[in-house]
Amino acid sequence: MITLKDATLQRDACLVGGAWIGADDNQFDDVTNPADGSVLGRVPRLGQAETLRAIDAAEEALPAWQARSAKERGAMLRRWHDLLLEHQEDLAVLMTAEQGKPLAEARGEIGFAASFFEWFAEEGRRAYGDVIPSPQSDRRLLVIKQPVGVCAAITPWNFPAAMIARKAGPALAAGCTIVIKPAGQTPYSALAMALLAQRAGIPDGVVNVVTGDARAIGRAMTESPKVRKLTFTGSTGVGKLLLRQCADSVKKVSMELGGNAPFIVFDDADLEKAIEGVMQAKFRNAGQTCVCANRIFVQAGIHDAFAARLSQEVAKLQVGDGAEEGVQVGPLIDAAAAEKVVEQLNDAVAKGATLLQGGERRGANFLTPAVITGATPDMDCFSEETFGPLAPVFSFQDEAEVIRLANATEYGLAAYCYTRDLGRAWRLSEALDYGMVGINNGHVSTCEAPFGGVKQSGLGREGARQGIEDYLETKYINMAIE
Ligand SMILES: NC(=O)C1=CN([C@@H]2O[C@H](COP(=O)(O)OP(=O)(O)OC[C@H]3O[C@@H](n4cnc5c(N)ncnc54)[C@H](O)[C@@H]3O)[C@@H](O)[C@H]2O)C=CC1
Ligand SMILES: O=C(O)[C@H](O)CS(=O)(=O)O
């Protein structure tokens, strides 16, 4: 049972064309609290037929929505932003209940989500075209930007509000309409945001949210020719599957996929700032973020001091139900996620690593944050995304070695480097094969900057001025004049 100031925010129906609907066959899926396995409620289990109706609703709403001025669309996005902040506490309580993150992080995520609506409310008004000097005096060459059209979004459970806002914000600002499928573990955040979109005055059919059978919904989204773009955030494996499903209709795609972030600390780094940064980069959301420090590389001269300080700070972390004030590390999303982290820990120890701290299972989904040293590239924690509170420390001798090790992965999302040498900071920023690099800080995400990866971490960018480009088509007009 979730106690909210505004109980209407906990929805047990989906939003399609302005109507709150159930599944055609009246099937539901339970929503559970990862902290204790309790059932919080249930949401409709929609499938292909309902999703196709949602796509039709989005298509029907498109002409009127794109005919509005960017300023008018921006005003509604701004109102949606305001409503998220007005209901920040309720939305955070909902999120912690269904996802597990500490309340303080959930409050922060609502603010982060709202920032994308605020940002793109303005970016839509700057979707400029071009006038090109014509090579012929009787021609005029123009370039205009137009909305892509009906978009589909599939989002993950780890940031159930921000990942929706990072997609719906630019889509609506550009004049697109959207059908959103949230993760089955975290539907309440999405449905509450949909209700607030209605209250913000966003017209029926512009924002639609469908919960239920991921495969069937995904198939409807990827196979419908009415859907011009698919935007996905989640694992690389599912991203590749969706990419293949989109190929037949040659859809525009945005992919925000998995990561394997190196966190590099050189001998000349400020040790305390590096410790502060790794605690943030590793243990935010219990390590369940795609930009988490996945491999911690520490130069030999500072290694022992760093490992000792890291272990000290990790031992202080408060683990528990995210709804309890003061908790810093909540449960993992499910038992399988906890088991995967323990398997990586056991693999590392079996291959020679030393466990300094943590790694104990507490109940189904809790795991005490762990620190290991003596990690080596043959271990699973070097090549696989951990997505949990395991901090493997690798030692290295010099720049060339750590650049080679850091880049030895098919992922390329975020990387971090701590050094007080300006030249080294530049050399690492340019040599690290990643979409985002944090220098002397462990948190890079903000709506003003382009979030995204290279290699198998994804395609496209979200946020920043680049973020709206993925929702616009470029049209070239060649006009003959008398
Ligand atoms: N690059 C980025 O910005 C982010 C990447 N991730 C990655 O996502 C993973 C963790 O999140 P999860 O939700 O477990 O990922 P996931 O890939 O299992 O699920 C993501 C979404 O895809 C849906 N989905 C799963 N199979 C599908 C199918 N066959 N057809 C259609 N939809 C399907 C799920 O229901 C969910 O809504 C990690 O690998 C993490 O690195 C997560 C968040 C951000
Ligand atoms: O889903 C994620 O992991 C987020 O993209 C990470 S962040 O944007 O909150 O840093």
Image (tube, rainbow, N blue to C red):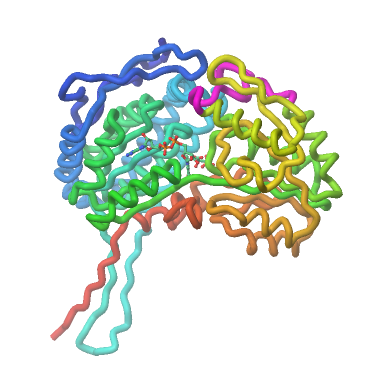
Q: Is residue 293 visible?
A: no
Q: Position of residue 330 (x, y in %)?
A: 57, 23
- From the image, give the main secondary structure of the stretch colored magenta: loop
How many numbered dots are placed on residues in this image? Answer: 0
Query: Residue 75 location in percent, x, y?
Result: 33, 43
In this rendering, is residue 318 above or below 395? above
- What range is drawn magenta here? 315-336
The residue shown at (36%, 28%) is 184
Image point 19% across, 19% down: which residue?
26
Residue 119 drawn at (x, y percent): 44, 47
Residue 231: say if magenta: no
Q: Quadrant of residue 316?
A: top right
226 with respect to 77 (left or right):
left
Left or right of residue 162: residue 366? right
Looking at the image, is 415 positioned above or below residue 178? below
Residue occupying image coordinates x 20% and y 22%: 22
Q: Position of residue 259 (x, y in %)?
A: 54, 46
Quarter of the rendering occupied by the C terminus: bottom left
Which residue extends farthest front? 350
Towards the viewer: 155 or 117: 155
Question: Would you say residue 355 is visible in this rendering?
Answer: yes
**The N terminus: image quadrant:** top left
